[in-house]
Image: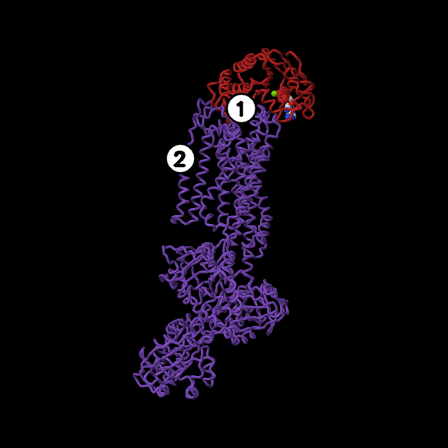
Chain colours: A red, B purple
Amino acid sequence: MSVLEVREVCKVFGERRVLDGACLTVESGDTVAIMGPSGSGKSTLLNIMGGLDTPTSGTVAFGGTNLADLAPAETAAYRASHVGFVFQEHHLLPQLTAIENVLLPTLAARADRSEERALSLLEQVGVAHRRDGFPWQMSGGERQRVAVARALINRHAVHLCDEPTGNLDRETGSQIVDLLLRVAADQASDARMAVVMVTHNAEHAARFARNYRLDAGVLVAGT
Amino acid sequence: MTLARLVLRSLWHYRATALATAAGVAVAACVISGSLVAGNSVAATVRRTALARLGSTDVAIISSRPFGAHVAEAMSQVQGAVITAPLLLRPASAANPDTDVTAAGVQVIGADQRFLRLFARSARLPRFEGRAALVSEALAQDLALQPGDTLILHVASQTTEPTASVFARRKLSEAIRPLRLECAAVAPADGPGGFALYAETAQPRNVIVDRAWLAEQIGADSSADVVLIHVRPGADLSGIERALRSSVRLGDLGLTVAAHETPILQVVVRGSSVTLSDSQLEALARLDPGAAGRVDPASIMLASRIACQRTGAAEHYVLSASVPDIAVPDDGIVLNRWIADDLQARIGDAITIEWLEPAPDGSYPSRTAVLRVHGIVPIAAARDQMWAVPEFKGITDTARISDWDPPFPLDLSRITSRDETYWERYRTAPKAFISQAMARRMWGDGSSGWASAVRFRVGPTRSLSDARDDVEKAIMASEHIRRDGPTLRHVRAEALRAAEGSSDFRGLMLGMSIFIVASGIALASMMLRLSTERRASQIGIMLATGLSPKVAAVSVAAEGALAALAGSVVGSALGIPFAGALVTALNSWWAGAVARHRIELVPDAVGLASGAMGAFALGSLAAWLTARRMASAPALRLLGGWRATAMAGHLGSGDGALHPSAALESRPARRSPLIWWAMTAVGAALVVWRGVGRIPEAAAALSGGAVLLAAGLGLLSAYLTSVLDRRQPASALSLRRIAARNAALRRGQSVLIAGMIAGSAFLLVVVAANVRSGSSFNVRDRSSGAGGFNLIARTSGPLAIGFDTPTGRANLGFDPQDEAAFDGVEIVPFLISPGVDASCLNLAKPVAPRILGVSDAFVRRGGFSVRTLARTDRPWSLLAGDRRAGSGAATTIPAFGDAESVRWILQSGLGKTIVRETATGSYRLRFDGLVAFSIFAGDILVSERDFHRMFPDVRAPSYFLIRTPERSERAVADALRRNLGDAGMEVRSTRELLIEVLAVQNTYLSAFLLLGGLGIALGSLGLGVVQLRSAYERGSELAIMTAVGLTRRDLAAMILMESSGLLLYGAALGAVTAAAANAARIASGEAAVNWAALGAVLIGTVGVGLASCVMAAYRATSGRIVDAIRAE
Ligand SMILES: Nc1ncnc2c1ncn2[C@@H]1O[C@H](COP(=O)(O)OP(=O)(O)O)[C@@H](O)[C@H]1O
Ligand SMILES: [Mg+2]
């Protein structure tokens, strides 16, 4: 079953056509890696898929609903309940502790705010011992793991990860990828989680089920 | 790349923030310079009016008694005297016979055309001669007079006798003369129509008539009591002084000198009235006329009846004398042969002597004494004593006794033909001789003078004419006596002193606008702080690359200073329109604050420059403090951005902190919230203690409130600290909590914002609680500001007969039908001196404030609320209290004054003294009591006894406080106006006066409220701007929240919660603490809190603040989220 359907998406910034008819279908349980040179439009594509940005033309449909048809609040609700973001920068709120940062999305989804689940996620990403630490008291890797845990809290259908390992050392990077893939695999079969990850790292990409390359505004399968 | 270049680059890069900073400083500069310019304009107006009333007069010759025209003549001869204008000045009342409208407090100016030359704007005025008069604008307006209209003046006749003398003409019909005049033209208020010797700011009601004509009408000979002199610029005034010395004659000092050969060689000095005044007598006694020997006073008195008890024979209207040559024991009497024969009296007989004593009610009750015949002298001996008898018009100049026209009742039926024969033959030869003590007793023991002449015996070696010259010279050389006559007054110099104004108007205006200044600066400093914080990492880089913290701070501060410079220059230019707006307001809604003066905008460079410099200084200071604070933080922290810095600063070395620097940081000293609770208790105690009366109410309320306020802010700070400290379950995470964390992260700024709002709300409520209502006054309450009196009455001159008794009213010619209205009416008369209003109604500085003489009866009665140094149940008795002789010549006199006027206008205080100069000397008035807000706002009160010393000329009251039953208030006021209209009777309700005085205060307070409200609104608008900018700073944070699915509304709500929480807490804290501190005042009903206005200002302020925060929140979340993420 296709969860996210990207059709003929174009994005133009001024004179520049960054995306030019990109197409991508993400099935539930899919793991997709997108590679491409810097500035090729990978982040742009991910933002459009998450409803953070709108395409100049083309459509993004989630479960058959065109995102363009949603009101702003509905878009927010879409993100809250279906999309988890992990950015290259951790983007943790400095005023919140690790566990509070993990719980942040539950504020939006008005969802289960149980501490156990957040703690178990922190355990899964291996930073449970830092639960009450503030972001600036943590290392880059720890922060990124907290960010991943935050992305996972709401049991989203799709996870959009934009170079989550870009700033990390090799080992930590592969731990994060492990984590994403493992958590995806752990999900119950009826609500399998899809992961779309942008990366420069071919090694990481190779571990994903499908690989794409963003080239001249279109997605080309393979590396 | 130089530092300067870096500064300029950054300035351009962060131009939006710099612009906001500049705007804040510009607001401050605009308001400071505008207020200063507006204050200067008021001061300039006061100055202009103070000087304009004198025309080009520089100095004046002024005397309490009219002096001869030769003085003016001599002045006009002096080198450098360009214009000399002799004047006769008289108080009067005026009426328009067509409308029957009357106006009291009129000044009649008897002048000639030279007077007009003193004023620039009088060229086109017609000549005034005879009945043709010039009427001042103010009076023409009050009486609706047009040129050609008739007006009736009632002017006091020339009097010489003190009112307490039996020879004084006290009947209104004799004391006041009606004059029918024609209004020839209206004299402009900025020309002769505005002339006034004293710097009262009210527009004078002047009538200008021909001096010679006026003198003739009121029986003042052809004399003047003032000569105005305009001298050539730079001319030496000593010429005038010399000319005055040489031109003043004995008559100008109210004295005559005569040489007599009988009974001995003697020089006799007499006054222009029947008796010499006490001060004249004292001065004469101190004279040292060289060879002329001993000084002896003599006295004469008219006994209304002298009867011999043994024979029963009596004689009426017997001139009795006390003379140095006929010694009489205190209980004795010496008769001349004539009367001794008539009475068939023998030595040792008991004689009943009766005389009339003038009572304040206009009657002349008889007094009697029993004396023993001590001797009988021949008529010739009596005739030798005629030197002691002065002239008295209506008696000494009549051919027959039946032609006498004395002021006292004369029973002509008692006069026999034998009396007429004596008068014909021996004229004023005294029939009886009494002791000096008896003479004094008959003259009322000091209520007026008693000596009718003073004689200097001439030594055997001197010729009589030489002796006479000696006495004259000695008199003319006596400063004491000369002070009583024409003296030189530097009226322009005095006016210049008065022109300094009663208050510092610049300070007042600045004070009223201080909130706007504060919010402008607060806005600027918050913007500076934001922009500095935003660049924490930049500063970190600067420090990391080896720049010293100082240089880093300077470069950042320089940026702020440049913005402040631009703002202050632009702002001070905008000060002119702001001043224009203030002046417009002062000329319309706030006219009450400047006693309805027309204020003209006078731009002054100093004010503008001060505004610019002040705002620039404040702005740069803020920039420097902010930059220094930031640059003194550890570089590593700064590199992590301000939030990390702030957090680390707060939490100190965290659990397993990764930043090495964090471990080095010591935790800031954290105060326990206990201290704030303790402060709350102290504040509450201060407020409650006020009731105990140990601390002045206002001080207790203000300080207690301030302590409560500070404690409230301390608690807020403690709460914010605990927000970050508290380890709450993570599951309790909410938007509200994030908002609280945000506020806590910027604890300093949050407390600052809340404090600003709280302080403003506090002051607004305090100000509002100080607005007093006139209508809620219970004037009937003795301790109120009206002392229980509901009417206040004034006449244009002293009223020799009091209207406080039925007899007095009858003697004043009241309509008997009006008598019923006075049932149950209490009337208390006061003596009142010349001088100016010392209340806030007078914008000029009261150089010679008005003094009220308080009678013993009033001291016994008491009333009003008086604060004294010593605790006493009868504060008014302090006026009669101890008189320590002051240092030097000045004597200290206990005085009371209005608390506010003494403090603000006279710049004195309880127990302190001011100096008041009068014609008789210089007196130190020590304020032994301060009357709480009252009808005495413009007056200084002293006891009647002290008053007589200061102003011996003022012997009768012209100021009256009246308490009537509720129902007869109107009837009494009407009866007084009707029956004493000629005396210039003005009756007002005390409430009206209180409201008038209040209006000034209340206008200031409401202006303060309005400007303060404006300032706070601006402040909260600034809060919005700050929020907006800080929300932009937090773009990525908001973006991440958006990314996880929070809606814009959620984010806006969070931002709003953060700022509105502070806003509402601040407003509530300020309002509640102020209300609590002033609870007693508000509850008493004395405060006329305009709840609607106050509520509107507070709600409006909070509303504007909330609105600007909402806007900020929406604007902050309306940007493209993607960009925000990208920007990181
Ligand atoms: N808001 C924007 N305005 C203009 N150009 C943009 C904007 N966002 C992205 N771009 C441009 O689009 C291109 C693709 O950017 P991005 O998607 O971030 O690339 P990638 O993530 O592949 O490195 C870049 O050249 C970038 O400069
Ligand atoms: Mg990218």
Expressed as whole percent of the image width and height from the top left, the position of residue B54 reads 54, 64
Residue found 60% across the figure and 73% down from its top: B129
Left or right of B84? Residue B719 is: left
For the question of whether residue B1128 can be seen, the reply is: no
Q: Secondary structure at mark 1?
A: helix
Task: Identify the image quadrant of the C terminus of chain A.
Answer: top right
Amino acid type indicated by mark 1: Leu
Amino acid type indicated by mark 2: Leu
Q: Secondary structure at mark 2?
A: helix
Task: Identify the image quadrant of the N terminus of chain A.
Answer: top right
Residue found 30% across the figure and 85% down from its top: B347
Expressed as whole percent of the image width and height from the top left, the position of residue A79 reads 60, 22
**To which residue does mark 1 refer?**
A104
Expressed as whole percent of the image width and height from the top left, the position of residue B505 reads 52, 53
Q: Report, in whole angstroms, how far the alpha carbon at label 1 lies from the one at label 2.
A: 34 Å
Left or right of B347? Residue B577 is: right
Left or right of B798? Residue B1051 is: right
Which of these two is toward me, A204 or B688? B688
Instruction: Report ligand 1 position as a quadrant.
Output: top right
Residue at mark 1: chain: A
Expressed as whole percent of the image width and height from the top left, the position of residue B771 reads 50, 50
**To which residue does mark 2 refer?**
B674
* Callout count: 2
Which of these two is toward me, B793 or A99? B793
For the question of whether residue B337 can be seen, the reply is: yes
